[in-house]
Image (cartoon, rainbow, N blue to C red):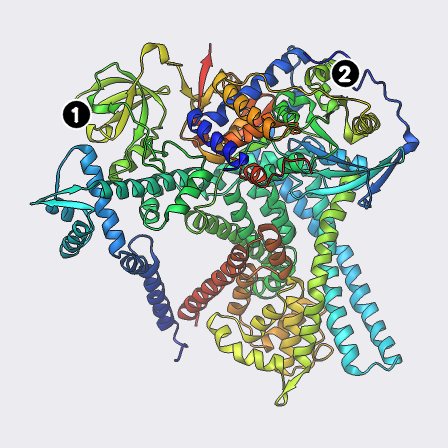
């Protein structure tokens, strides 16, 4: 091939770059599509169907074949084939148009849920993946981890009870902690409560919640709840959400006695020359970062004040137990303080 | 079930009941103890408090107005002292090692009736490579590292990290990378070792992989020489000095651009799963103990890095001599390699000589220019230098320029050589150090291949655009 | 609560014998005692290490200079000591590599004395680590380093009261200027030889529900391994799910061999 023409060379290069991009770009790259198709064998379809049935049953709704074809990305004939096979292996009972899980099917579904939630917990505690990625990574992993590996993972994580979104993780025997609380949209104005669960599906709404910087474990007070918007105060800030978004937040009402600190605000709101006392670290701060902050002395009752502000503002150094420790704004947002008059 | 298993069972059971707060509560408990003890044993004079001078220095060096000017001023001073100060010992060492000892060794070998290949291999190959590395590398490092270490011991460097953190945060990196990067201007291997101060795994890997984008002192001379010959020549001679300096600084700044860009890209792709825990403690100022610092930085940084470079450069010298002196079908191996790579080199706006020089000079960037000159003589047949496999440099930039032009060099070749000198694989000392620090074959490979791949792409694009617009 | 007859560093006036010290560098083939050097990052731990061994590790004003474990030695009054410089850590409760190295060495390496280097100017934060180490080992010495800096910042520490409170000897030092190092060596040798018997502080402010769980576990441990000196710490670690401790339990490593 003659490569002496620079224009032709540039065009060749552009074509190659475009091809590589189409092939390997995240999510929709051909490479991933092919890989996913190779992976979507019968086992994966069965497990996805079981999980779908399990969630609907828990929500108290009955499900039909039609619903499944709408909700899952598989082809209709594939779903129907697999459903028939599942009926034969007694994972489900087909009653006319409706589908119900058998006890065996339920057990299987709980196992999938266990892997999914454990893996999310693992991603949150032991890796640096962003929250927005946990779900789809766990969706993939739930089909791949066998029983033993799952138990090993659970031990390694200290047999956790809740996943990072606040969903209970089923134990090996299928027992699950209960979540109390109700969706934020159902709570009357002036309710005091704690966010105990953030739903990570659908993705669009979850991304909005993340963008709002709403934290699990935060205490809230609802100030407005109409069919147009839900407004609440939390950690010294006001949050305004569309009801469809607020519906994905589960809040456990607190009685007056268990309200710890209503005047809790985020460390990021501390101004120079203000004195404050640390109340604790938000549940959003996990794994190594949480431990490091604790080790550095960010524990309840410690006095804190701003020592220095970086010329580029985002990073601030705080005086904690005699040391000057610099944190970034997003980290400071995860430390709760009480300002001292 | 054994007794141990029973205890483990019991601990699992208890852990389930204790819930998620265990770690937090233990730490709070320990700190509560600590607080009580401190209350009983420590008295702080509340009227005086922290040392006023420390607070004042902190306010100035991190202030919005003075923070950055002070930083740039100090960096400029350090670089200035290094470059100016290294000139004299460097030329002194060069004249001693290259102009005095080298001929003396050759004479000695002749006197002892060494066969030509043995004296060539040992003296022209191994010895010359070592001499070159030492004379170019040792003086700037012996000045740069102690200066840097003094700033470090005083406690100023953490403030630099603090000031710049926001920029690095935007690129997904750690503010302390500013320092490992500056250290890389001295030597990339030392820069990679310095990343130990970054205690967050992801940011540390980013700093290790991108350190090579800091133009190290083995590459500064290449940049300066080529810029003087080619860039300085395109402007009126009054401005040639300024133009050359601007071009070199431009390359260094471009390197920082690549560093930020690839940090950002890595943190969003390959490294996004690595754990990231940012925190930066600003230690108190400590007046450094001058002589001790000087001593330890010489021992710890300069000599260790120099030793490693020597260990790697010696075989490189041997290889360079061998490929120039072993003939296949009447031509040397170097000749065949150059011809094989000429086409690809041309596509990148370079040539076969440059690519071969970069392949055999992986161990040390210092010997790239001498190797290029020697190979140019070898393929063009011009009468210069001291023979096949003997690296050399010419007395003046203009002589070098003439030789290179005769070798077919153009302004494009020069620009792309400067770019490629910035964007190519780390030297083997650095590669080895990266492996030692990461203990990972994977990350060492990424750190090695990513820059050279970027170099290919950038020089390719520049070459094509150049040929479209200027030819 | 601490026994009255405890000898702290100051009470047991150092009969320091300067001629008895010989810095051995890395030449530590045969030794009588192993001394571990622990401490927070940037407390001058490496300076203390250098002062004791005559070695010259680089010591920067940075947290986290020493990453790998360094070893050296010294000889004092005809006894040879091997000194192991552990990576600087803020705590021993987490999962980072550094902390695992430090924790496992103190727990399983069973050093004869653990010297905890502490920044006198930041005592409260440093005590976090001290208190944890005192849960693991009975033979410890606290080296209150950077006294010069603390003074500059107008911080005064009652070392006698601190020693009493912690139940281990406390030596004030400014290792950069070699102050307090002779006293430190003397106290280390006394603890190593059993002249000073420590009765270390144990964590008090443990929430009730945790305390109950820990008691239950540690009693079970004591029953199984009667010689275990730090069953409470092992119980803490089991509750954290420390893999290395679990493994040691399974392989009966806690049994006296």
- Give SS at disc 1: loop
- Check the image and report above or below for C28 versus A82: above
Image label count: 2
Residue located 60% across and 78% down the image: B406
Tag 2: Cα neighbours inside 10 Å, few (<14), some, or many (≥20)? some
Residue at the far bottom in the pictured view: B329
A50 or C56: nearer the viewer: A50
Name the residue nearer the viewer: C127 or B248.
Answer: C127
Q: Is residue A317 in view? A: no
The residue lying toward the viewer, choosing from B127 and B206, is B206
* Residue at the image position 26 percent from the left and 18 percent from the top: A222
Quadrant of residue A105 in the image?
A: top left
The circle drawn on residue C6 is: 2
On residue B349, the disc is none
Residue B34 sits above or below residue B287 on the image = above
Residue C119 is situated, as x and y percent measured from the top left of the image, at 68, 25
Residue A228: image tag: 1
Residue C140 position by quadrant: top right
Tell me the mark number nearer the camera, choosing from 1 and 2: 2
For residue B294, above or below residue C127? below
- Vertically, is C141 above or below A171? above
The verdict on a common chain for dots 1 and 2 is no
Q: Position of residue A148 (x, y in %)?
A: 40, 46
- Asked if residue B233 can be seen in this view, the reply is yes
């Amino acid at each position: 091939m003659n490569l002496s023409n620079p224009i032709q060379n540039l065009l060749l290069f552009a074509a190659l770059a475009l091809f590589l991009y189409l092939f390997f770009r995240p999510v929709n790259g051909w490479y991933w599509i092919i890989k996913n198709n190779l992976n979507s064998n019968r086992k994966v379809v069965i497990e996805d169907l079981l999980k779908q049935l399990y969630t609907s049953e828990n929500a108290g709704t009955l499900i039909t074949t039609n619903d499944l074809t709408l909700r899952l990305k598989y082809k209709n004939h594939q779903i129907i084939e697999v459903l028939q096979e599942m009926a034969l292996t007694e994972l489900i009972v087909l009653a006319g148009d409706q589908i119900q899980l058998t006890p065996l099917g339920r057990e299987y579904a709980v196992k999938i849920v266990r892997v999914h939630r454990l893996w999310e917990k693992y991603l949150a505690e032991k890796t640096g993946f962003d929250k927005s990625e946990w779900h789809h990574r766990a969706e993939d992993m739930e089909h791949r981890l066998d029983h033993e590996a799952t138990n090993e993972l659970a031990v390694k994580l200290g047999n956790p009870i809740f996943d990072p979104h606040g969903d209970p993780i089923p134990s090996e025997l299928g027992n699950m902690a209960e979540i109390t609380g109700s969706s934020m949209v159902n709570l009357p104005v002036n309710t005091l409560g704690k966010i105990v669960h953030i739903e990570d599906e659908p993705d669009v709404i979850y991304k909005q919640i993340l963008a709002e910087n709403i934290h699990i474990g935060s205490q809230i007070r609802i100030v407005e709840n109409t069919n147009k918007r839900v407004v609440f105060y939390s950690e010294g800030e006001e949050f305004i959400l569309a009801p469809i978004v607020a519906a994905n937040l589960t809040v456990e009402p607190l009685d007056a006695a268990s309200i710890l600190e209503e005047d809790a605000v985020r460390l990021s709101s501390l101004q120079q020359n203000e004195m404050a006392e640390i109340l604790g670290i938000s549940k959003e701060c996990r794994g190594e970062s949480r431990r490091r902050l604790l080790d550095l002395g960010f524990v309840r009752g410690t006095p804190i004040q701003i020592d220095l502000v970086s010329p580029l503002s985002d990073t601030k150094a705080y005086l904690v137990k005699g040391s000057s420790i610099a944190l970034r704004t997003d980290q400071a947002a995860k430390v709760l303080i009480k300002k001292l008059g | 079930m054994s007794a141990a298993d029973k205890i483990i069972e019991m601990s699992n059971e208890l852990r389930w009941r204790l819930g998620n707060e265990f770690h937090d509560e233990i730490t709070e408990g320990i700190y509560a103890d600590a607080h009580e003890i401190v209350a009983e044993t420590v008295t702080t004079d509340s009227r005086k408090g922290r040392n006023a001078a420390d607070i004042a220095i902190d306010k100035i060096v991190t202030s919005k107005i003075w923070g950055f000017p002070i930083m740039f001023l100090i960096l400029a001073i350090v670089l200035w002292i290094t470059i100016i100060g290294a000139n004299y010992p460097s030329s002194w060492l060069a004249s001693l090692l290259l102009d005095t000892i080298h001929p003396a060794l050759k004479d000695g070998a002749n006197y002892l009736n060494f066969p030509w290949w043995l004296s060539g291999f040992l003296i022209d190959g191994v010895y010359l490579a070592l001499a070159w590395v030492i004379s170019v590398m040792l003086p700037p490092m012996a000045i740069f590292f102690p200066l840097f270490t003094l700033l470090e011991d005083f406690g100023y460097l953490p403030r630099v990290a603090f000031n710049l953190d926001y920029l690095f945060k935007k690129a997904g990196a750690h503010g302390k990378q500013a320092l490992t990067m500056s250290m890389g201007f001295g030597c990339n291997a030392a820069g990679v070792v310095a990343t130990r101060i970054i205690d967050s795994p992801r940011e540390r890997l980013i700093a290790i992989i991108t350190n090579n984008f800091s133009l190290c002192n083995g590459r500064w001379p290449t940049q300066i020489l080529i810029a003087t010959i080619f860039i300085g020549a395109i402007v009126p001679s009054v401005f040639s000095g300024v133009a050359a300096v601007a071009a070199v600084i431009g390359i260094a700044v471009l390197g920082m651009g690549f560093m930020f860009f690839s940090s950002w890209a890595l943190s969003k792709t390959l490294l996004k799963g690595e754990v990231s825990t940012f925190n930066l403690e600003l230690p108190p100022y400590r007046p450094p103990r001058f002589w001790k610092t000087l001593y330890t930085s010489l021992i710890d940084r300069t000599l260790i890095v120099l030793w490693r470079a020597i260990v790697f450069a010696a075989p490189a010298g041997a290889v360079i001599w061998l490929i120039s002196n072993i003939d296949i079908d009447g031509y040397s191996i170097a000749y065949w390699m150059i011809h094989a790579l000429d086409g690809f080199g041309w596509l990148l706006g370079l040539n076969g000589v440059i690519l071969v020089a970069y392949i055999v000079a992986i161990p040390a960037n210092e010997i790239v220019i001498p190797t290029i000159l020697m190979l140019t003589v070898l393929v063009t047949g011009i009468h210069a230098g001291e023979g096949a496999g003997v690296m050399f440099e010419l007395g003046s930039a203009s002589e070098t320029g003439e030789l290179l032009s005769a070798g077919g060099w153009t302004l494009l070749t020069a620009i792309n050589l400067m770019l490629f000198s910035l964007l190519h694989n780390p030297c083997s000392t650095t590669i080895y150090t990266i492996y030692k620090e990461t203990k990972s074959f994977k990350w060492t490979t990424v750190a090695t291949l990513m820059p050279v791949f970027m170099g290919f792409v950038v020089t390719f694009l520049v070459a094509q655009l150049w040929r479209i617009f200027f030819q | 609560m601490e026994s009255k007859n405890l000898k702290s560093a100051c009470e047991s006036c150092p009969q320091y014998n300067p001629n008895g010290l010989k810095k051995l560098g890395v030449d530590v083939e045969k030794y009588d005692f192993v001394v571990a050097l622990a401490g927070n990052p940037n407390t001058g731990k490496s300076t203390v290490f250098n002062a004791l061994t005559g070695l010259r590790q680089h010591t920067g004003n940075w947290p986290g200079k020493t990453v790998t474990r360094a070893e050296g030695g010294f000889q004092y009054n005809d006894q040879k000591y091997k000194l192991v410089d552990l990576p600087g850590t803020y705590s021993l409760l987490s999962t980072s590599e550094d902390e695992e190295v430090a924790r496992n060495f103190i727990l399983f390496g069973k050093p004869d004395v653990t010297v905890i280097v502490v920044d006198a100017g930041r005592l409260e934060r440093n005590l976090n680590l001290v208190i944890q180490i005192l849960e693991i080992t009975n033979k410890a010495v606290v080296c209150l380093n950077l006294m010069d800096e603390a003074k500059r910042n107008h911080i005064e520490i009652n070392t006698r009261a601190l020693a009493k409170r912690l139940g281990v000897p406390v030596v004030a030092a400014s290792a950069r200027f070699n102050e307090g190092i002779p006293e430190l060596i003397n106290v280390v040798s006394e603890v190593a030889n059993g002249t000073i018997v420590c009765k270390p502080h144990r964590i008090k402010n443990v929430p009730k529900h945790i305390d109950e769980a820990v008691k239950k576990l540690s009693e079970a441990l004591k029953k199984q391994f009667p010689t275990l000196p730090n069953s409470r710490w092992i119980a803490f670690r089991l509750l954290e799910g420390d893999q290395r401790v679990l493994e040691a339990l399974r392989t009966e490593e806690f049994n006296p061999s």
